[in-house]
Image (spheres, rainbow, N blue to C red):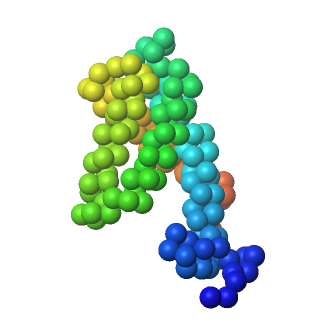
Amino acid sequence: MPFASSSETKNLKGNVKEPTERRKTQMDLVSLLIQIIVSTIIIAPILWLVGRALAGKDKAKLTDAIWIVVLGTIIGAVVGAYVTVAGGLIAAIIMLVVWLALIKHFFDCGWIKALVIAIVAVVIFVIVFFILGAILVLFDLALPNLWP
């Protein structure tokens, strides 16, 4: 077998991996990092405010909300990558339980309160999303090339 060039590496079976496979993995990691950063900036403050209102100021801290979002995003990426049974329904159920468990653990509350915090946070997130979308459309900052 010829020697692999410096831009090629061998996988576990000894076959030469193409550089495009490595780039795809790197892009997946970059997209995961971007998703973590954006999710933390957008979701963590909303989750923190809802947690403070429902679980109490002493139990819901901003760092806890950040950890919930970071861990939820990473676990969601792993579960989404490996659990593809039944059109993602099982992955969605697993992720619902994971997010509720993270809220329950970090905000030190019960399962019902974690569910209420999650529902209220989602409702507030949707409202904020639509308000920001309306502002972007109002000031013509939305993607105009998408509409004829």
> Is 144 situated above or below 65?
below
52 to the left or right of 25: left
**x and y percentages locating residue 137 in the rendered image:** 59, 56
Res. 65 visible in picture: yes
Q: In which image quadrant can residue 109 be found? A: top left
Quadrant containing the N terminus in the rendered view = bottom right
Residue at the spot 53% in from the left edge and 20% down from the top edge: 61
**x and y percentages locating residue 70 in the rendered image:** 53, 40
For the view shown, which residue lies furthest in the top direction? Answer: 58
115 to the left or right of 53: left
- In depth, the one of 50 and 143 nearer the eye is 50
113 to the left or right of 49: left
**x and y percentages locating residue 15 in the rendered image:** 55, 79
Quadrant containing the C terminus in the rendered view = bottom right
Residue at the spot 27% in from the left edge and 57% down from the top edge: 89
> Is 45 situated above or below 53?
below
Residue at the spot 26% in from the left edge and 54% down from the top edge: 90
For the view shown, which residue lies furthest in the bottom direction? Answer: 1
Res. 120 visible in picture: no
- In depth, the one of 144 and 81 nearer the eye is 81
For the view shown, which residue lies furthest in the right direction? Answer: 6
92 to the left or right of 42: left
Residue at the spot 57% in from the left edge and 62% down from the top edge: 28
For the view shown, which residue lies furthest in the front direction? Answer: 1
Q: In which image quadrant can residue 37 be found? A: top right
